[in-house]
Amino acid sequence: MRDDKLIKKLHKAIDLEFQANSWKGTWKGYTNEQVRGLLFKELNELFTSVEIKDFDNAILEAADIALFSVFLADPDRVIPKLSLVQNEVHNEND
């Protein structure tokens, strides 16, 4: 079934994104608003990928959205960060 293939592809993308970027530390110190802002940024990137019919990138953006959603649901902010915020400087010791 096509849905099963898509879910498996999404699951693989989530695993790859998480593993590739887990060395970056945790989300401790990020507010809900900061994480929500990053989530909305990823939503916009997904919409753009779909609009230009770049579905290979769209599945990666969907994986990023899934992970940011989990980070938002993580009240202790202990789940590792993604590289998607590498351009945003954040000192976890603040």
Image (cartoon, rainbow, N blue to C red):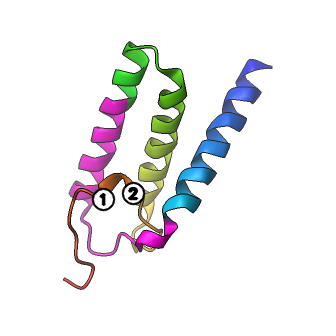
Q: Please name the residue that numbered disc 2 is placed on.
A: 83
Q: Position of residue 80 (x, y in %)?
A: 46, 68
Badge 1: residue crowd in 10 Å (few <14, some 14–19, many ≥20): few
Q: Which of 4 and 76 is in front in this view?
A: 4
Q: Where is residue 30 in the image (x, y as percent from the top left)?
A: 26, 67
Instruction: Tell me if residue 51 comes above or below residue 80 in the rendering.
Output: above
* Residue 27 as seen in the image, left or right of residue 8: left
SS under mark 2 = helix
Residue farthest right in this picture: 1
Q: In which quarter of the image is the C terminus?
A: bottom left
Looking at the image, do the residues carrying marks 1 and 2 touch, with CB atoms under 8 Å apart? yes
Q: Which mark is residue 34?
A: none
Q: Please tell me whether the stretch drawn in magenta is mainly helix, strand or loop.
A: helix
Q: In which quarter of the image is residue 32?
A: bottom left
Q: Is residue 49 magenta?
A: no
Q: Is residue 40 magenta?
A: yes
Residue farthest bottom in this picture: 93
Residue drawn 44% across and 65% down? 74
Q: Nearer the viewer, residue 12 or 74?
A: 12
Q: What residue type is labelled 2?
A: Ser
Q: What residue type is labelled 1?
A: Gln
Q: Give the range drawn in magenta.
A: 22-45
Q: Please name the residue that numbered disc 1 is placed on.
A: 86
Instruction: Tell me if residue 12 comes above or below residue 54 in the rendering.
Output: below
Q: Position of residue 23 (x, y in %)?
A: 48, 72
Cα gap from disc 1 to disc 2, whole angstroms = 5 Å
Q: In which quarter of the image is residue 90?
A: bottom left
* Residue 88 as seen in the image, left or right of residue 48: left
* Residue 83 as seen in the image, left or right of residue 20: left
Residue drawn 45% across and 14% down? 53
Instruction: Tell me if residue 61 comes above or below residue 91 in the rendering.
Output: above
